[in-house]
Image: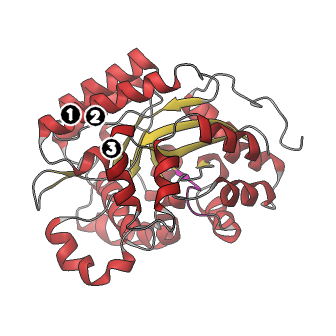
Amino acid sequence: MHGKVALEEAFALPRLHEKTRWWASLFAVNPDKHAAEMTDITDIRIKYMDKHGVGYTILSYTAPGVQDVSDPKEAQALAVEINDYVAAAIKTHPDRFGAFATLSMHNPQEAATELKRCVTQYGFKGALVNDTQRAGEDDMIFYDGPEWDVFWSTVEELDVPFYLHPRNPTGSLHEKLWAKRKWLIGPPLSFAQGVSLHVLGMVTNGVFDRHPKLQVVLGHLGEHIPFDMWRINHWFEDVKKPLGLDCKKTIREYFQQNIWITTSGHFSTTTLQFCMAEVGADRILFSIDYPFECFADACDWYDGVPINLVDKAKIGRDNARRLFKLPAFKDSEKHVGE
């Protein structure tokens, strides 16, 4: 399929190349290759895009990024630097690249102000935040309390999506749960556990009820939530609500109206088909998770997925065009079968 849109695609600041390579050495088979691809914006990336039929990419800063910076001033300065850097880097390729704002999430109003700057000044397509904000050795800031309403109101006002992306466990959480189970950190388990807790907290603490137009994107085919949809719905509706849970809609309705999922890093045909049945093709978006995953694995898989061409076009391109209000881009008007 030509003209695919990818939107969980990471980059890092070149000045932090050594840190990027060190981080890559913890999980990448070839850390030098990973670091080179991570710090590239247009050269290597466009070659991959052209080869594998990706017409448009929305870039975001790599995890854990600013969410790993516990000092508020340092985190804010880094976020501004990242946003200014990527805006300049993609300026000459408006038909191939967009970007998500990087935000320090120490202060709701400060995060709202930086998001507004990025959307109005640079035309960014929304924000991507790496789960909870680190605020000390053991403190984690969640965004599901009423003190964050000023931020979510701004997201609604700007009419842009918010991508809730995973991060690594830290502090006592890491020591108590993951230190002796290190091979489960990341995609095997910890990422999905963290994000699913956070977004379901947004559901049960009323964020979507107070902000009904809010659109939140989850990667990796929904961070396990679609597979528990029946069970979550049953317990919310039949047990928790009679006991006092007061969110106004069902979990299925939040997924129909507020939550999207992407194929990033999860290239399974049977899993995609399950999610299409459980969540619906209208709420699924193609993505790669590059450079943690490779273009060939994602694109060759998706191009060969045996689903009808209408749904393939929706998931591969059209849903993203609608959600992010994308301009024309390479192969954006090509039919799926071409």
Closer to us: 218 or 134? 134
Closer to us: 291 or 147? 291
Q: Separation of disc 1 and disc 3 at Cα?
A: 17 Å
Residue at the bottom extreme, as displayed? 180
Q: Which mark is residue 76?
A: 1
Answer with left or right where residue 39 lies relative to residue 316.
Answer: left
Q: Position of residue 64 (x, y in %)?
A: 32, 52
Q: Position of residue 13 (x, y in %)?
A: 37, 39
Disc 2 marks which residue? 79
In terms of image quadrants, where is residue 107? top left
In terms of image quadrants, where is residue 246? bottom left
Are discs 1 and 2 less than 8 Å apart at CB? yes
Q: Magenta region's main secondary structure?
A: loop
Q: Residues within 10 Å of mark 3 (few under 14, many from 20)?
A: few
From which residue to which does the magenta span run? 261-266
Q: Residues within 10 Å of mark 1 (few under 14, many from 20)?
A: many
Q: Quadrant of the C terminus?
A: top right
Disc 3 marks which residue? 16
